[in-house]
Image (cartoon, rainbow, N blue to C red):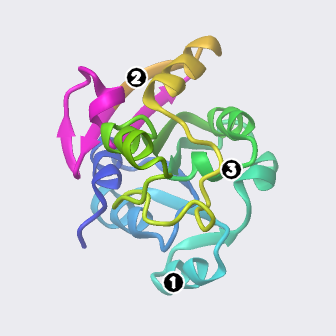
Amino acid sequence: MTLRPDLAIIAANVAPGSRILDVGCGDGALMAALRDERGCDARGLELNADDVATALERGLSVMQGDADTDLADYPDAAFDYAILSQTLQTTMRPHVVLEQLLRIGTRAFVSFPNFAHWRVRASLLWGGRMPVTKLLPLEWYETPNIHHVTIDDFRAFVKARGIVVEGAWFLNRGSRTTAAAANFRAEHAVFLLRR
């Protein structure tokens, strides 16, 4: 199975045999790869019932739940990694969700679409409309994205909270790009964080 580019980065940087909580795990593709290829004990939390059913059919341990409310039920340091891929911008209180991730996991992977990418800026500047792109495929009234975060916003956010960035990867059209001008050039970002 081929993983989405951000998930492939996460999978490649998780230590073998780790305990994982994938929050917003979707159909469990990342969890299955971590279990099968890295020998990880992967658990998941997913809001969408159809995705939960698909993950369960894969033999994965997934619970239906909401990142905004259900992370408080997990004990401190229960996982080596807490993962939140393309979900941060859909949560009601991203700052609380991030704090919970870093409480539950020793480290946290967070990936998100960059709303400052040049194509997004151009769409707003020249068309005056919210963009529809491969990474942001829905019209503004259908999108689950309620917090339009940029790479520079996220960097400032973690710095202000004393959160350590252990790694950062930037993607453009599914391929890695440099950190230089990432806020303008990258469509997507992946961060590895710890307290």
Q: Is residue 2 magenta?
A: no
Closer to the camera in the image, 62 or 151: 151
In the picture of the structure, the residue carrying the numbered disc 2 is: 166
The residue under label 3 is which amino acid type?
Thr
- Secondary structure under tag 3 reads loop
Verify CB contact (< 8 Å) between mark 3 and mark 1.
no
Q: Which residue is mark 3?
A: 91
**Span shown in magenta:** 169-195
Which label was assigned to residue 54? 1
Secondary structure at numbered mark 2: strand
Residue toward you, 135 or 63 = 135
- Residue 141: x, y in percent? 63, 64
Q: Earlier in the sequence, mark 3 or mark 2?
A: 3
Query: Could you tell me how far apart the alpha carbons at marks 3 and 2 are, in whole angstroms?
Result: 23 Å
- Name the one closer to the observer, 61 or 148: 148
Q: Quadrant of residue 185?
A: top left
Q: Quadrant of the N terminus?
A: bottom left
